[in-house]
Image: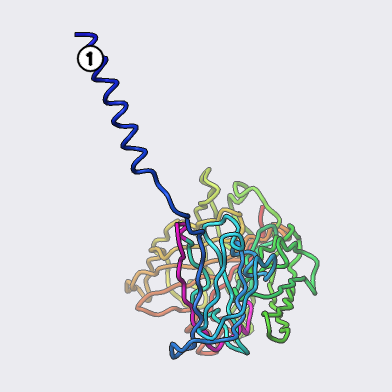
Amino acid sequence: MKKINLGIVMMMIFSLSACFEENDLSGPITPAEMELTVTDANGAAVSGATVDLFANNSDYIEFSNVLATKTTDGQGVVVFSAAEMIDASKFHFSAKSGDLRNWNGINNRELMVSNGRSEVSTSLGAVTLSSAISGPATAISGTTVTLSVAAFPGSYTWSIVSGTNGTIDNPASNEVNIAFDQNSVDEIVTVELSYAPDGFVTQTFTHDILVTAFCPIDVQIIDGALVGGDITIDGLGWPAWNSQVVTTKTGDNNLILVTGLGIGWMEDFWGEVITNMETVNMEVDDFGLYVTIPTQAYMETTYQGAAQDPYTISGSGIIDGCNGTITIEYELTNYGTDWGTWCNVNGYSSDAVFTAVLDLP
């Protein structure tokens, strides 16, 4: 039996070898290519259009490290070889003819590396160039903001032309991050962008950012009675009432309890008797800079012995650790009326919100 099996095995090996020899793969492998057709807005071929090829989006945006540049033929076609596309599987390209570009449409395609040619098309149209820098107009010192303009191929040069409190991470890109140093005074930082889209005249934009001073403090010190002024009725020449604000620390740097806002205005100017007053939540942001009082039930009062609709309170403010103060702007509302706005509209106050400026302990 062993001899018979060995003979069968030898016959199978010989048969398989012969089979492989008869079916051996032959013929040339066509190199990978990318065929790009450029058309106008009506779908007609554009001859003489310039096509620039880039290995990645960064090079495309900054119009640098061009892999290859070609001009479309009479059928609006250019062909890039695998060697011109290096070995990247994704590429970016810019197509232009006169003032027309493909920037508002498709500008990248994934190349399928295969035995043959990949076909891509793009259309040209009028370009609407960016007219402004996008990004915030305010920031906190010690933090980072992002500014940008439309991502069109060309040269970008960002710089700070007023104020010294900022560092730009990538001044040659369409999008930059600006890191502001911690500063104890407010500062307006003016950022300038010199922007030259490929084939267009250079444009210059500026963008102002108010960078708020920030001196960090331990939120846990905001505990107990806070002296200062609370609400001014300057339309009648009345100075701010002395603060009766009391805060309570919670052990949580994002939460302080507060009560006593608006007592002088309520009892003196408005003439209502406070029968109950809640201690409400005042939320602190992660920086320990901004505070928010979400809308909450706050006061119950009577007027000439008659119970009034309960008051709610809401507001926001800023902890100024540099100058040792906390400013809270807030609303007292009942019967659907914000009484700070009412005092302003009726000439009692030049401020449309109630404001308390209090000293930190």
226 or 70, which lies in front? 70
Horizontally, residue 84 falls left or right of residue 341, namely right
Q: Which residue is mark 1?
A: 5
Callout 1 amino acid = Asn
Q: Position of residue 114 (x, y in %)?
A: 45, 57
- Secondary structure, mark 1, is helix
Residue 321: percent from left, percent from top? 69, 57
Residue 37 is one of the magenta-drawn residues? no
Q: Residue at x 71, y 74 (%)?
A: 155
Residue 294 placement: quadrant: bottom left
Residue shown at the point (62%, 58%) measured from the top left:
289
| Residue 188 appears in the rendering | no
* As drawn, 312 above or below 46: above
* Residue at 61% in and 63% down: 84
Above or below for 11 versus 325: above
Residue 13, quarter of the rendered image:
top left
Residue count near mark 1 (Cα–Cα under 10 Å), binned few <14, some 14–19, many ≥20: few
The answer to whether residue 130 is left or right of residue 2 is: right
Where is residue 6 drawn, in percent x and y? 27, 14
Q: How is the image coloured?
A: rainbow
Give the residues in magenta: 112-133
The extreme left residue here reads 1
Q: Is residue 141 left or right of residue 107?
A: right
Most foreground residue, 130 or 8: 8
